[in-house]
Amino acid sequence: MRALRWHGKHDIRCDTVPDPKIEHGRDAIVKVSTCAICGSDLHLFDGFMPTMKSGDIMGHEFMGEVVEVGTENKALKVGDRVVVPFTIFCGECAQCKRGNFSVCERSNPNKEMADKVFGHTTAGLFGYSHLTGGYAGGQAEFVRVPFADTTHIKIPDGLTDEQVLFLGDIFPTGWQAAVNCDIEPTDTVAIWGAGPVGQMAIRSAILLGAKQVVVIDRVPERLAMANAAGAITINFDDESVLDRLKELTGGKGPEKCIDAVGMESHATRSFDAMYDRVKQAVMLETDRPHVLREMIYVCRPAGTLSVPGVYGGLIDKIPFGASMNKGLTWKMGQTNVNRWTDDLLKRIQEGQIDPSFVITHTVPLEEGPGMYKTFRDKEDGCIKVVLKL
């Protein structure tokens, strides 16, 4: 089969590899119809995530048709159309029973490695390094789905791939980010990053009743898309984020702040951002936390910081004293995808939202390697790339 594989920093290739096989009774094999490149994939592309190996198959946003099931899998049958969430979960451990699927205790076969790095293991993730299990990803013609009797979302007839594909990651990720804010009707929600997750967080915050949503970015196409949803936009190249947020909130700051950027944040004419780039270049810091610093500073006292943006390791110069003394609440983590998908699928069916709005580029799988750079560099108005098979 064809698959997009990682061969090192900035080196993604479309290779021919063996087809996957059933390895456990709960497995299923899915023939992929549509997949996507996620902003999190760019962290791998740029070489910021450890424990990648040459030849690893990329991708964790994918869907398709079940073509084979293991003997213990009673939830799926051949011919079922499914979206596969990026978090692999057993459905039986203590964390899964609480709905904390992203920290499933059983789905990461490299548990000992994760225990050493994080203190405890997280769930296994598709196509996202050996720290999270080393599972082959979904930018491929076929995928083996472990724990497939739980790790799936069945799709009813009448919905296109493009409408439902993002139920596997960016839609529930943006939704969880907004839900974690406990939004009140009087709240201003400030969102850093108007990429795909940020766009979903914008619409989620609006659906959940925020008084106003403010989005910080500098890419014109992203800001225009955010504005079309009803968000107030701030281009950080053109104006002060701090001054504008004070103006919009009567000097009090936003009650709720969402970091939809993560480890590769950018800033213009900012000393701390330059400091981070230097430290990252010499491997004294893994992630660039400019957005976290700015959120702590501007958030209203007793407010909430929600962090769906991915961080991979160590960050520096975080004003934790300000966070503690202002009484800020932090909520973060990989997405508990299946906690939200029944509700979100219903909202799609009812026409409350069509997540396909975020797609700007649709290409065959073979063109995927070139699209990584286009997406990373925000060329040609690129906001979200979908790959068809």
Image: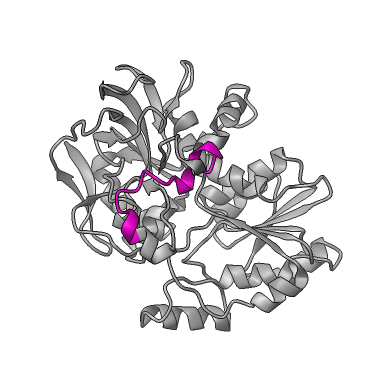
Position of residue 35 measured from the top left corner of the image (x, y, whole percent): 36, 38
How many numbered marks are there?
A: 0
- Please give left or right for residue 311 compared with residue 257 in the image: left
Q: Residue furthest front?
A: 94
- Please give left or right for residue 33 compared with residue 314 in the image: left
Position of residue 39 measured from the top left corner of the image (x, y, whole percent): 44, 53
**Above-or-below relation of 275 to 2:** below
User: Magenta stretch containing residue 104, yes or no?
Assistant: yes
Position of residue 188 measured from the top left corner of the image (x, y, whole percent): 77, 54
Instruction: Tell me which corner region of the image, top left, top right, bottom left or bottom right, holds residue 205.
Output: top right
Q: How is the image coloured?
A: one colour
Q: Is residue 240 visible?
A: no
Check the picture and name the quadrant holding the C terminus.
top left
Q: Give the magenta-colored segment's residue range.
A: 96-113
Identify which residue is drawn at 52% across, 57% down: 309
**Above-or-below relation of 276 to 373:** below
Identify which residue is drawn at 54% across, 45% down: 173
Instruction: Tell me which corner region of the image, top left, top right, bottom left or bottom right, holds residue 339.
Output: top right
User: Magenta stretch containing residue 322, yes or no?
Assistant: no
Along the line of sight, which residue is nearer the eye, 118 or 279? 118
- Please give left or right for residue 165 compared with residue 373 in the image: right
Q: Is residue 188 visible?
A: yes
Identify which residue is drawn at 67% across, 62% down: 234
Check the picture and name the quadrant holding the N terminus.
top left
- Please give left or right for residue 265 compared with residue 73 in the image: right
Position of residue 129 measured from the top left corner of the image (x, y, whole percent): 31, 55
